[in-house]
């Protein structure tokens, strides 16, 4: 600025460069986030089909009151659904309200989310796995099948690695398991900076801290993935811009003891598979529970035309359909 600079421009410059201006901008943006982003608490207490209950357990000297949703046959084989970050058990409500006969479908509010207490972040994959273990039961020789979306993917993998004798099957759904693919975005650093960290919803703070810790947690998990002996069906979309598809070959290389290990590739599909590929997931659950009828398939590639409501027969679809391409 010089003496010839117009007064109005000088005033504007002082405003732009003032730290108080930027504090005001950050407060405003944080308020906008708070107003526009859902709480992720999952405001649902149950209905005629789905019941909410609390299970208390202890892990590593900490007591947790885990909030869960249950549906179906209380004596049936369990299928346990684990949400990503952020999220809550209600992400799986459509599945629970349509639980097949003879099964019990369970969705958990992971530690740090929903109604689970205490309301603080839990970045340890082992601690998150212990929450899933607290719900698991083997009934009539039938072990639980675990489904994990996004960050729920490494959590269900950790359960199968830590408790291999107690798991009947694992489905990482758009799972984030490769530590080499993790990167922290600028906005995540901003989320740990005052005043943002004070103003954003607690679920988003917990998410941010989970993501910051995830690379180290995945490196620890990588050394244990060979312990997984349960059947694994990997489901991932090739156009996932939140969790890269390159996680798939990583899992295929590391889960060397899974028997069998199958992969369903959804071409041109994104990250939100629980909602846009429901029939594919339901078919994969059936395939594990039914003992992989036919024969195990290393990799099946489904294109959009047959990745929706029409399934290949080995995924429970009508006999007139089949995968467009199956890699031997």
Image: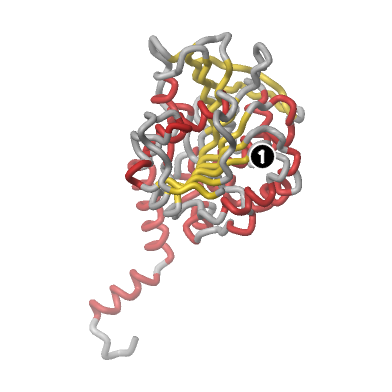
Total numbered badges shown on the rendered structure: 1
Q: Residue 123 location, x and y as percent?
A: 64, 41
> Label 1: which residue?
125
Q: Secondary structure at mark 1?
A: helix
Q: Residue 306 location, x and y as percent?
A: 36, 41
At a point 33% along the width and 75% down the height, the residue shown is 13
Q: Nearer the viewer, residue 310 or 254?
A: 310
Above or below — where is 152 with respect to 299? above
At a point 57% along the width and 16% down the height, the residue shown is 54
Above or below — where is 283 with respect to 217? above
* Among the 4 quarters of the image, the one containing residue 152: top right
Colour scheme shown: secondary structure
Q: Residue 219 location, x and y as percent?
A: 70, 51
Mark 1 is surrounded, within 10 Å at the Cα level, by few (under 14), some (14 to 19) or many (20 or more) other residues, namely: many
Above or below — where is 38 with respect to 132? below
* Among the 4 quarters of the image, the one containing residue 20: bottom left
Q: Nearer the viewer, residue 306 or 73?
A: 306
Q: Nearer the viewer, residue 124 or 71?
A: 71
* Among the 4 quarters of the image, the one containing residue 94: top left
Please indicate, yes or no, whether residue 161 appears anywhere in the rendered image.
Answer: yes
Q: The N terminus lies in which quarter of the figure?
A: bottom left
Please indicate, yes or no, whether residue 207 appears anywhere in the rendered image.
Answer: no
75 to the left or right of 314: right
Q: Residue 200 location, x and y as percent?
A: 45, 44
At a point 55% along the width and 31% down the height, the residue shown is 294
At a point 33% along the width and 89% down the height, the residue shown is 2
């Amino acid at each position: 600025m010089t003496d010839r600079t117009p007064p109005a421009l000088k005033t504007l410059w002082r405003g732009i460069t003032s730290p108080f201006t930027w504090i005001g901008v950050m407060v405003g943006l944080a308020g906008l986030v708070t107003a526009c982003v859902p709480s992720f608490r999952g405001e649902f207490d149950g209905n005629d089909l789905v019941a909410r209950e609390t299970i208390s357990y202890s892990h590593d000297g900490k007591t947790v009151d885990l909030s869960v949703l249950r549906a179906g046959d209380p004596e049936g084989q369990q299928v346990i659904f684990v949400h990503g970050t952020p999220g809550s058990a209600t992400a799986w409500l459509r599945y629970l309200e349509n639980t097949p006969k003879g099964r019990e479908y369970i969705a958990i509010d992971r530690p740090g989310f929903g109604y689970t207490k205490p309301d603080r972040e839990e970045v340890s994959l082992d601690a998150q796995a212990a929450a899933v273990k607290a719900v698991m039961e083997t009934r009539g020789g039938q072990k639980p099948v675990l489904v994990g979306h996004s960050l729920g993917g490494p959590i269900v993998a950790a359960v199968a690695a830590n408790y291999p004798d107690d798991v009947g099957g694992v489905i990482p759904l758009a799972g984030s398991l490769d530590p080499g693919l993790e990167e922290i975005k600028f906005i995540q650093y901003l989320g740990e900076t005052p005043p943002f960290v004070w103003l954003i919803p607690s679920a988003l703070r917990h998410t941010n801290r989970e993501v910051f810790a995830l690379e180290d947690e995945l490196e620890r998990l990588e050394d244990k993935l060979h312990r997984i002996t349960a059947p694994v069906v990997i489901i991932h979309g090739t156009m996932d811009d939140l969790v890269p598809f390159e996680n798939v070959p990583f899992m295929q290389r590391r889960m060397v003891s899974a028997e069998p290990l199958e992969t369903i590739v959804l071409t041109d599909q994104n990250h939100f598979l629980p909602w846009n590929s429901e029939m594919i997931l339901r078919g994969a659950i059936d395939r594990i529970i039914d003992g992989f009828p036919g024969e195990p398939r290393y990799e099946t590639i489904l294109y959009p035309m047959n990745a929706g409501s029409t399934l290949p027969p080995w995924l429970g679809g009508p006999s007139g359909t089949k995968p467009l391409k199956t890699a031997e």
